[in-house]
Image (tube, rainbow, N blue to C red):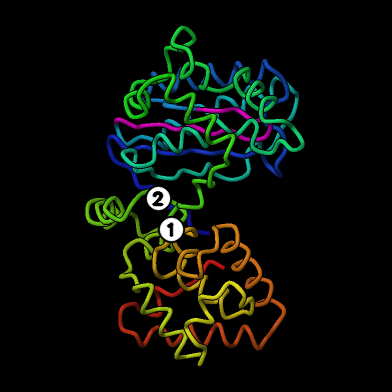
Amino acid sequence: MARPLRILFPGAFYHVMCRGNERKRIFLDDDDRSKFILYLKESIQMYHVHLHAYVLMHNHFHLVVETLHANLNEFMRRFNICYTGWFHYHHKTCGHLYQGRYKAILVDADNYLVELSRYVHLNPVRTMQEVTLDEQWQYLTKYTWSSLAGYFDKRRRLDYINYSMIDAMIGGSNSYKHYLYDGLKNGVEDILYKTKYQLILGDDRFLSYLQNEYVKKGSRREQPAYRKMTAKLIDSEILIAYISTTLNVDIEKIRSPRQLGPVRGIVAEMLYQYSGLSLSEIGKLLGGINYTAVSMLRKRLKVQLQKNKSIRDTYMDVKEKLCTIGQVTCEDLTPSI
């Protein structure tokens, strides 16, 4: 299996997430958490990494980091190995602690750093149900294993966290507190659904910059991600019109949220695969549905492709005929569904 594509360059920002194997806990007590922070601090100093935000949950953790020397792999390898060794020693266990390799999304800091930090800091209360807003807020502000306290109160800042950039962007502690409370009160879209190619959080300008400056220099061992990043994308309107003609389905029906058949699922999947759009952007094209609805369309299609030969044949027919558009090659059209 191909390894995930890592785009590495000096000054790059990443959202890093690592989950426990089989979703099991990776922190069993505060000794674990304290040791994890110790190894994290050591690695930050050793590899000259800036940590802008973090949160430790029971079975996973989130980091927002900036690598000054294009060394994310070395940084992550060092403290993950150290912590895994500690965990097994402390709890007399063995085997894999984490569920595969860590996930790293390259972030357009100018446009998404503040929003990403809010997503990270809201994690401790994200799944709370039947709890009042005030109770969620109180729990969040008292949560120990997060960088949030230093953003609310300068007296509680830690020397291994870089607060200055988000502070400057948001306008200080009071502004950040209001920003977070507003997100908790009104709900916010999961920012990770805006990720493109499952590895980049950024606007079109940022994506173009990466493609021109870094991706073409990437390793051919990482073929699936490399092909997606370097392929010439199909314009979304052209793709929808082409599928409409191929399947003899009116475009307005494709865009209507009331149409729940496999055609809309096929369109959603093709847009995701070959137009480089996020789930939110696809939702706007499909009648203004949200990213969750787009995700459900793709999941439903995956089940249908496994169980229904007719739908599978239709899907494959559309995919193969896209080769005739001339903007992509058949090799580019390897779906991840």
Verify CB contact (< 8 Å) between mark 1 and mark 2.
yes
Question: Residue at position x 43%, y 16% from top?
Answer: 160
Q: CA distance from mark 1 to mark 2?
A: 6 Å
**Which mark identifies residue 304?**
none
Q: Please name the amino acid that badge 1 sits on.
A: Tyr
Q: Is 209 situated above or below 143?
A: below
Apparent side of residue 93 relative to residue 315 in the rendered image (left or right):
right
State the SS at label 2: strand
Quarter of image, res 81: top right
The residue drawn where x is 73% and y is 24% is 28
Residue 197 is labelled as 1
Q: Which kind of residue does numbered mark 2 sit on?
A: Ile
* Quarter of the image with the C terminus in it: bottom right
Q: Residue at x 62, y 83 (%)?
A: 312
Q: Nearer the viewer, residue 259 or 101?
A: 259
Task: Give the residue number, with chain letter if any, for mark 2.
Answer: 200
